[in-house]
Image: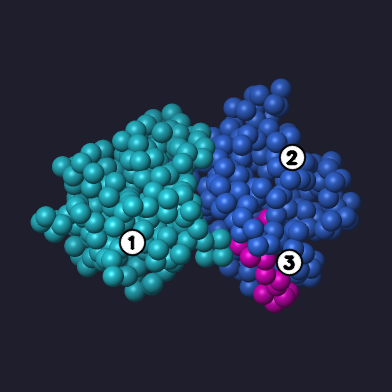
Chain colours: A blue, B cyan
Amino acid sequence: MFDIQIPLFESEDLRLGALDYEKDPEIEARWTHDPEFMRNMYLQPMRPLSQFQLKKKYEALEKKIQEEKKSYHFRIRSRADDRLIGFGEIYGIAPANATGFVRIGIGSGGDRGRGFGKQALALLMRYAFVELNLFRLTAFIPEYNTAGLAFFQKAGFVEEVCRREALERDGRRWDLLHYGLLADEWRARQK
Amino acid sequence: MKDILTGKLVRLCASEPDESTKAFSAWDRDPEFAGLLHINPERFWSLKQAQKWAEEDAEKEADEFFFAIRALADEKMIGFTGLMDISWPNREAWVVIGIGEAGYRGRGYGTEAMSLILQYAFIELNLHRAALHAYEHNARALHSYEKIGFKREGRTRGVARRNNQPLNSINMGVLRSEWLVTQKGTP
């Protein structure tokens, strides 16, 4: 049954919320200088950004979300001290098809391996399947992101597509994997 | 120098916005064309609006390359093909194709047009790989792509939904090295 008492945006340690133009750019600017973070999150070349550029990016992001209504962006903060930990998105939503894509990143190395990603992904999946009524979620994961592959596998995602040699980084080719999770599969895991 | 945009049955070319707009609005009325091609439900747009977008697209010079397919015998515009969502650092593009004129399907025109767009991708744009997806139930298309050299790379469950049922797609890809092998011995 649908239970409105289950929190959509809060987990044990984390809270999902909106962009903060005052506090976030300084922290996120550092993440954009971290090749490991950037190469795991994005398929385009990493590009370090200034706080100024990030603020512009936030403006463009909110404008795009408002106009296209095809994505949901969440900032991940610690409940204890409101510290920015990372961000997650449900994006590329096709409403008639009930499909969407998911990405999630924990910005600082020191915050990884502490279960934050798992909590945040759980919140995102609940939002996607219970609130947005999506039929499926897709995650794009580069072959070299072994931690990311294990992370999504543990969450129940299944490898569906291997785009062979779709990426070139560090002078060699890498496969890009599509991992998918269906709403039914997610529901079965909630029992 | 070889004309890489011309084959034995068809050639790829640019088209004027008003001709392609009219052709597309006619093709979209064919349920087989629309049903096999479109992932998202389609709307009807006025000729005026559709033409405005076609003109804006033509001016944009975006990172997309779309061609009309014309039959060599009578210069009839029979379909379209193109490369989109191009990632230049990774040198990958997504290929799309549709044969709008029903009488030209299943006769090798689409297969040759696909061969020409791949030639453009690999020989002119120097891409490393081409990707595509097509509905799992679109057997004719999947067979044609495999004949050209595309390899199956997976299956996306519920890529679309119609009548509250999920439709699946087959994902395929071909690398430049693989495609060059299929071209050996071709003049």
Amino acid type, label 3: Thr
Q: Nearer the viewer, residue B92 or A133?
A: B92
Q: Write down the quadrant of residue A180 in the picture.
A: top right
Q: Identify the residue at horizontal 61%, vertical 48% (top origin).
A: A175
Label 1 secondary element? strand
Reading the image, the residue beneath label 2 is A150
Q: Residues within 10 Å of mark 2 (few under 14, many from 20)?
A: few
Mark 3 lies on a secondary structure that is loop
In the rendered image, which residue does mark 3 sit on?
A32
Q: With respect to residue A74, does B145 lie above or below?
A: above
Judge left or right: residue B100 versus residue A101: left
Q: Position of residue A45 (x, y in %)?
A: 63, 65
Q: Residue at x 57, y 42 (%)?
A: A162
Disc number placed over residue B66 in the picture, else none: 1
Residue A165 position (above or below residue A7)? below
Residue A52 is one of the magenta-drawn residues: yes
Magenta stretch: give its range: A41-55
Q: Is residue A170 visible?
A: yes
Horizontal arrangement in the rendering, residue B86 relative to residue A13 (left or right) = left
Quadrant holding the N terminus of chain A: top right
What amino acid is at disc 1? Phe
For image coordinates 63% across by 34% down, the residue present is: A158
Main SS class of the magenta portion in the image:
loop
Of the residues under marks 2 and 3, which one precedes in the sequence?
Answer: 3
Query: Which corner quadrant holds the C terminus of chain A?
Result: top right
**At which x and y percent is residue A5?**
73, 34
Distance, label 3 to label 1, CA atoms, is 34 Å
| B102 horizontally vs B160: left or right | left
Callout 2: residue from which chain? A
Q: Quadrant of residue B33?
A: top left
